Image (cartoon, rainbow, N blue to C red):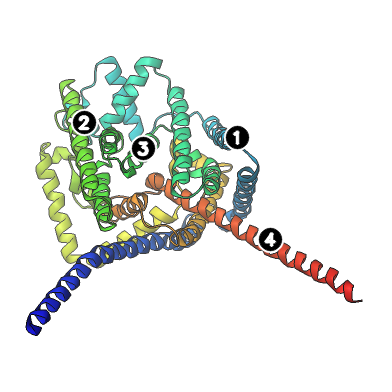
Amino acid sequence: MHSVCRFDNRTCLVRMMKNNITKSFPHRMKTILDVIIRFFIIAIQLFTLVSFIVCNVIFMSKYSEVFSIKEWIWFLPACLLIISTYLLARFLEKNRKESTVIIIGLLLANLLFVFFICSYPTEPVSDWQLVWNAANQMANGTFTGGITPGHYMHEIPYQQGMALLESYVIKIFGIQYSVFKALNVLIMDGILLCIYHFSKRKSSQRAAVYVYISSSVFLCWAMSVPQFTNHQIGTLLMLITLYCFEKEAPWYGLLSGAVLALMNYLRPMGILLVVTYFCYTVYELFSKKPFAKAIAKLALCLVTYYGCSFLIDSYMIGKGYTDTYISRSNRNLYHKITYGLYDSKIDGTIAKYDYDYEAYDAAFKEEITEQLTNHKKELLENIANKMCRYLGMFDYAFEMTYNHDQTVWSAYPVKAYYSVQWFQYVIYSGLALLGYLGYIKIHHPDLYQIFFVGNTLVYLFVEAFSTYRFENYFYVLFLAGYGLCRISELQAEKANINQHQESSFVQTADNSHKYI
């Protein structure tokens, strides 16, 4: 009898141990993922602050015509701008209705947008001029670049998505670039409203006011408005697809996938978002979220994404605009990677390879393999240098406003615009770090944090310019606004403590008179 009991006890003990191990494994994995995500976000923000200092030193020593020591005088206006933003947000969150907050934020933003639009008669330049030309050809039915080997639109087919969008606008409003500037203003207004709504969901009504007002006067965004690019509309669609996917109901996966497919044709970030959604689903499973709902949402999103992509690809091929699937982005993947790793010694002309894209890309693949094998130190130095410029330099999107004209960017007032913008950005980055250190005390990592990390680290391997930070600004602004809100709360707490001490002192003094 005793042996049977001992056997049963041992069996129960083994079962309990197995259950504990099973239950603790998801928790441990979630904890590990939490640490990894938080580490990268803190590291990115710290690296941004260090990169700012490095870029400052380099510019002052080598490019003083753009930024010299005397430009630090613009640090004061940047500080005054942020202090004014803080005081306005503090006033609004205490004394005004939500509709008033939204109207004031949009008013401030649109005044800045109009100011920069009127600062120079902007026309499409660089890649956007090629997109503009293709859009005009699509509008009048003469576009053949997508099926012409060697043409920009044939080598980089994903730009045809932007060209097609612009062609529809041209058909409606005519060849008026001012229409696209107005469209950019509306898109940026949509981004601001998305950020406000997103901030309310992820933190609080109070914090959302600080985030929203800070975003409304963010110069990196305002100075990009005169030139119509895929960054603005891509960011708006990105925020919508992220919002939909984070919702719990599985059917939101359908909407998220459809918006993601549309976004991918305008701003080719589809694969990055797909990986983000997969990682987030895994994280949800470790967080003990309902397994069936999480998997169903991801499956619906992917089916809709690839289904809509196939339909759009078929439409573009049927119209004779292209001879490939645009959703596959770039024909020359390895050529693109070389831009982010080193200066290639291969002749960059596809004509040298008789327009054989496979042979052309194979040459770059071979060169990359050789570089990774024999030049590791140089590659690491190049990557560090690139990421330093990407995260720490001013956003030079405004150069496209005046066609990179040196007589403009090397003189005032443009130098002042850039300097104030640069200081505002780095102060916001510091506030974002402060805000995140407070945010993680009460919030777990989420979909937006996973995207922020992924969208930063991907530039380790591809070309990266400071203008490519555009899609990450929304989260920097969210954390910076959260940091400003936290400062306001600490000031309020300090004021309450002082008030309490003063009232206690007065009460003590009054009581003492009773014994005189």
Relative to residue 485, is residue 139 depicted above or below? above
Is the residue marked by circle 1 packed among few (<14), some (14-19), or many (20+) residues within 10 Å? few
Query: Is residue 304 visible in this depiction of the protein?
Result: yes
Q: Earlier in the sequence, mark 2 or mark 4?
A: 2
Q: Are marks 2 and 3 in contact (CB under 8 Å)?
A: no
Query: Is residue 467 visible in this depiction of the protein?
Result: no
Relative to residue 308, is residue 491 depicted above or below? below
The residue type indicated by label 3 comes to Ile
Q: Earlier in the sequence, mark 1 or mark 3?
A: 1
Disc 2: which residue: 308
Circle on res. 100: 1
Spot occupied by residue 342 in the image (x, y as percentages of width and height): 26, 56
Q: Are marks 1 and 3 in contact (CB under 8 Å)?
A: no
Q: Is residue 333 left or right of residue 89?
A: left
Name the residue furthest bottom: 2
Q: Quadrant of the C terminus?
A: bottom right
Spot occupied by residue 245 in the image (x, y as percentages of width and height): 31, 42
Disc 3: which residue: 240
Name the residue furthest front: 1
**Disc 4 on helix, strand or loop?**
helix
Q: Earlier in the sequence, mark 3 or mark 4?
A: 3
Spot occupied by residue 348 in the image (x, y as percentages of width and height): 21, 44
Is the residue marked by circle 4 packed among few (<14), some (14-19), or many (20+) residues within 10 Å? few
The residue type indicated by label 1 comes to Thr
Q: Are marks 3 and 4 in contact (CB under 8 Å)?
A: no
Is the residue marked by circle 3 packed among few (<14), some (14-19), or many (20+) residues within 10 Å? some
Q: Is residue 403 left or right of residue 244?
A: right
Q: Are marks 1 and 2 in contact (CB under 8 Å)?
A: no
